[in-house]
Image (cartoon, rainbow, N blue to C red):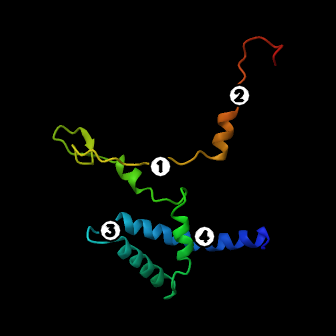
Amino acid sequence: MREWNAIKSHYYRVMLDVDKFLGWYNNLLNNRASDQSDADVLSAAHDMWKNLHKNKAFKYEHVWKIVTECEKWALQSIGYHANKKSRTSESGEYTSSTTPGTDDVVEIRSRPIGQQRAKRKNKVKITDDGDFSLK
């Protein structure tokens, strides 16, 4: 068994590198060419890591795989691109960037509300109605 202090310090040291790698991977995944597979994108992210870290391999891939399944670090490109609009009609009206007539179902995950927002939501507002016996 480890003390929580040891686990906490190790977590923060590991997550700095995992967050950097995740950012590069997501950037490469969003901007990939049409002929690139997910394995090609992962290989390119590993190459970027090696170039920037003196030819050292990324050693936290097992952590990265676990983290990408969590909601906080999940890829947000589906929701980001689903709401994007572009001006394509001659009249200048906004139309959806997806092709019309396709009924693709896009799942957009909503993130859970934060701690402060939950506290504000649960607060009860007292109105001043002149009845001081309740106050």
The mark nearer the N terminus, 4 or 3, is 4
**Mark seen at residue 15:** 4
Residue 111 at x, y percent in the picture = 53, 48
Q: Secondary structure at mark 4?
A: helix
> The N terminus appears in which quarter of the rendering?
bottom right
For badge 3, the amino acid type reads Arg
Q: Nearer the viewer, residue 113 or 107?
A: 107
- Read off the residue under disc 2: 124
Q: Residues within 10 Å of mark 2 (few under 14, many from 20)?
A: few
For badge 1, the amino acid type reads Arg
* Residue in the picture at 40% in, 56% down: 77
The mark nearer the N terminus, 2 or 1, is 1
Q: Is residue 29 above or below residue 97?
A: below
Q: Residue furthest front?
A: 1
Q: Nearer the viewer, residue 85 or 39?
A: 39
Q: Nearer the viewer, residue 74 or 120?
A: 74
Q: Check contact, mark 4 vs mark 3: CB within 8 A.
A: no
Could you give the CA–CA distance between mark 4 and mark 3, rounded to whole angstroms?
25 Å
> In front: mark 1 or mark 4?
1
The mark nearer the N terminus, 3 or 2, is 3
Q: Residues within 10 Å of mark 4 (few under 14, many from 20)?
A: some
Q: Is residue 80 above or below residue 67?
A: above
> In front: mark 2 or mark 1?
1
Could you give the CA–CA distance between mark 3 and mark 2, rounded to whole angstroms?
49 Å
- Read off the residue under disc 1: 109
**Mark seen at residue 80:** none
